[in-house]
Amino acid sequence: MSAYVILDIDVHDPLVYEDYKKLAAPTVTLYGGKYLVRGGKVEALEGGWQPQRIVVLEFESVEIAHTWLQSPEYAPVRAMRQQAAQTRSILVQGI
């Protein structure tokens, strides 16, 4: 069953974040993931949620999503994101 990593990202260091984006994509692909949403225009509809940047990744399963997130390939890249932005993220199983 598919799994989706959803990130709400507030970038505070755009230069480092640009480097992060270039390095993150190959790690997602390496684990069979793909981007469904990557920073498109956000329109708030309800609840006062005002995200700056939304990213949605699709993986084949929850287990593979966890494997990617904790992989040695992604670890240094993840640290870059954490340096460049405040992130809230969730993992949700699809149907």
Image (tube, rainbow, N blue to C red):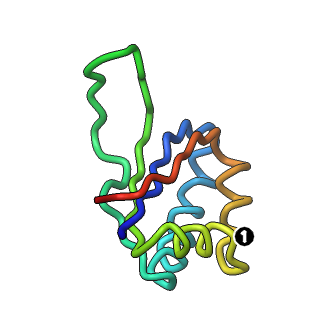
Screen quadrant of the N terminus: bottom left
Residue 33: give x, y in percent of width and height. 42, 74
Q: Is residue 30 above or below residue 52?
A: below
Image quadrant holding the C terminus, namely bottom left
Residue 72, image quadrant = bottom right
Question: At which x and y percent is residue 47?
Answer: 37, 15
Horizontal side of residue 52 vs 44, given as left or right: right
Q: Which element type, helix, strand or loop, lies under badge 1? A: helix
Q: Quadrant of residue 59?
A: bottom left
Up the image or down, 76 lies above or below 73; here it is above
Residue appearing at x 34%, y 58% in the figure = 94
Q: Amino acid at mark 1?
A: Ala
Where residue 44 appears, as percent x and y from the top left, is 30, 23
Q: In this rendering, is residue 49 above or below 59?
A: above
Residue drawn at (74%, 59%), measured in percent from left and top? 79
The residue tagged 1 is 75
Q: Residues within 10 Å of mark 1 (few under 14, many from 20)?
A: some
Q: Is residue 64 left or right of residue 61?
A: right
